[in-house]
Amino acid sequence: MLRTALVFSFFALSMGSVAHADGTDESCSSGFAALHLDQDLFVEFFPLVDALPKAFVENEDRDYTMGLALTVYSCPNSINPLSFFAPQQALSAWLFASKNQSTNHSESYLTTMGLDAYTPDELNTADPVFDDRPYASLLYLTNSYILASEDHNSALETSVTLGVLGLGIGDAAQTWIHKINRDINSSDTPYAPLGWHHQIADGGQLTAMVSMAKYLRLSSKFLANNRYFDVVVSAQGKVGYNTSMALGVMGRFGFFRQNTPVQNVIRQGGYKYASIKENSSYDQKWEAYGFAGFRGHAVAYNALLQGQFGDDIHALSASQLRNFIYDYTIGAGFAYKKLALQLYCSTRSSEHFLSVQRSHSWCGTNFAFGF
């Protein structure tokens, strides 16, 4: 637990920022923070899952079991020396210098600190479960540099992620959540997880990833007025503990701000933080809309399944990794001025060729506030 606390303390030192390519400092009057939480146990509480029974699988506490993340935008003068953005800027400039380094583009900086946890289906055993995915957890810090068009309809996001695999925080968090659930329901389930000592890289291993994503708002190109309907596509490549490529699409329908930055509508095909604009100017004060998204992935390597260094007793081989997977998301969003909330549910196809071949569903929420 001391090691986990030290890693959290290091990650907490990093902050994000927003700036503009023309050198103005208007972002210092408005940034935002967003809290992201999802859990497969939340499937029980979201009525939209019952309304679409064939779209989401029956709830099981397995696979991607939970995620927690905090994303922060703030002023350039708040950048901590541990916030690293130079590699992202250099990569963006090298690949897209002639097109994107003009005064008609804005530069955004954000920092996300988070935790992801994965488990097999059978939690009530201390033995390895070889016919299902291994336990795995990742505590991570991501610093992202976003180069966006002035009209907010296209953006390039370059990110560097540093993380630690195999800490005890996943075990502690899941054990605590399950105990609360059992106490509330006076039930023997969900079981306390007994196999976290078999997790990938148990005890801790450093890891890293570099990713680049391109976002494009299609609705602005084909519709003269897209106030009630919005379509954004994305393409992303990753190299590191997750080496893959993905294509995604997200659609919104309802009442929303037309000038929402494109990267806030879709990130990797799913909602990660709220659609709060980078400055205090809005084309409307409130939002209420539904959204749906889909993304497909071509996966070459996944350390949270295959392990990284050393012999993990439960690591999968390359032949057991499924190279093509997909996921989809539905949900609803609400916002008033600088407050925003999204509720959603997602399903992902099986990531491996083991005997357990089931899709998996989870639900979550994002809450954001501007400042």
Image (tube, rainbow, N blue to C red):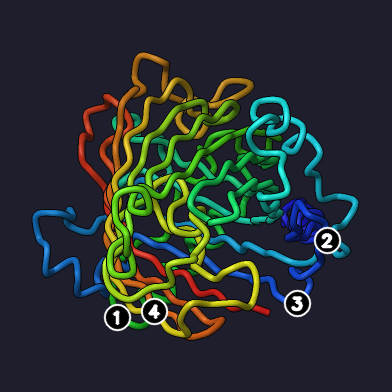
Q: Earlier in the sequence, mark 3 or mark 2?
A: 3
Q: Callout 4 environment at 10 Å: few (<14), some (14 to 19), or many (20+)?
A: some
Residue 37 x, y percent position in the rendering: 48, 65
Q: CA distance from mark 3 to mark 1?
A: 46 Å
Q: Earlier in the sequence, mark 1 or mark 2?
A: 2
**Which residue bears the numbered disc 3?**
29
Vertically, is 212 above or below 188? above
Residue 177 occupies which quadrant of the picture? bottom left
Q: CA distance from mark 4 to mark 2?
A: 29 Å
- Identified by mark 2, the residue type is Pro
Question: Image point 59% across, 34% down: which residue?
Answer: 211
Circles 4 and 2, Cβ within 8 Å, touching? The answer is no
Q: Callout 3 environment at 10 Å: few (<14), some (14 to 19), or many (20+)?
A: few
**Which residue bears the numbered disc 4?**
287
- Looking at the image, residue 11 sits to the left or right of residue 140; the answer is right
- Identified by mark 3, the residue type is Ser
Which of 22/347 is in front? 22
Q: CA distance from mark 4 to mark 1?
A: 35 Å
